[in-house]
Image (cartoon, rainbow, N blue to C red):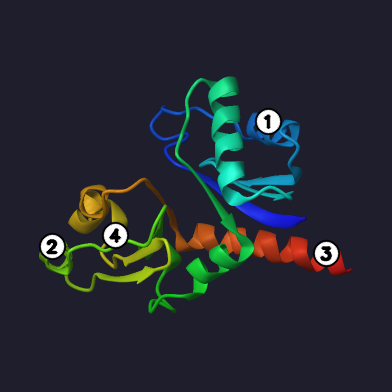
Amino acid sequence: MAVWIVLLRGVNVSGAGKLPMAEFRTMLAGLGLGRVETYIQSGNAVFDSDLTAPELEVLIQGGVAARFGFAPECFVLSAEEIEAALLDHPFAGAEGNRVHVTFLRETPTPDEASLRVLAQPGDGWHIGLRRFTLHTPGGYGVSKLAEKLPRLLSAPMTARNLNTVAALVAMVRARVFSDFA
């Protein structure tokens, strides 16, 4: 059985997309997913399944729609993909809340000139497989580049800061290592 990570977009944000994590865990287990764990209140979970990522995305999105009445974008990542998101970028040593990984359905090809126009001093980005990593030393919430990413990347996406990605990687590693104990 493989270890998977699900990231939902837009849950528990400003009163929209209300998704209690205890009920989300129960729903995921009810869908036949094993050893379900959630992390913080923003729609992150780690679980085991023999299904493929596309099958899991459809299953989980449908489960949330049926139980909670809305269908958020759903990104299912392998253990290798979440680990790569943590390590495959040039921002090692930066504060984890100043680096955000935007997960996408496909590898982005943004217009570099448009990115540079919006970037503030010190901002940087890295394009990886199905992700766009953005370093905003001045803060993500005030970054014009972060604000315009949905238009610039024009694809379904969800973002997590590097602290959250690191916590999810730690959950995956703990699970994998406990399997060998």
Closer to us: 28 or 41: 28
Q: On the rendered structure, is 117 left or right of 107?
A: left
Q: Between disc 2 and disc 1, whose residue precedes? A: 1
- In front: label 2 or label 4: 2
Q: Between disc 2 and disc 4, whose residue precedes? A: 2
How far, Cα to Cα, is label 2 from label 4? 19 Å
- In front: label 1 or label 4: 1
Residue at 17% over, 64% down: 111
Q: At which x and y percent is residue 142?
A: 23, 53
Looking at the rendered image, the quarter that the N terminus falls into is: bottom right
How far, Cα to Cα, is label 4 from label 3? 37 Å
Question: What residue is pinned by disc 2?
Answer: 114
Which quadrant holds residue 9? top left
Local SS, label 3: helix
Q: Amino acid at mark 2?
A: Ser
Q: Between disc 3 and disc 1, whose residue precedes? A: 1
Looking at the rendered image, the quarter that the C terminus falls into is: bottom right
Residue at 29% over, 65% down: 136
Question: What residue is pinned by disc 1?
Answer: 27
Q: At which x and y percent is residue 81?
A: 55, 64
Question: What residue is pinned by disc 4?
Answer: 139
Question: What residue is pinned by disc 3?
Answer: 178
Q: Amino acid at mark 3?
A: Ser
Local SS, label 2: helix
Q: Amino acid at mark 4?
A: Gly
Closer to us: 5 or 109: 109
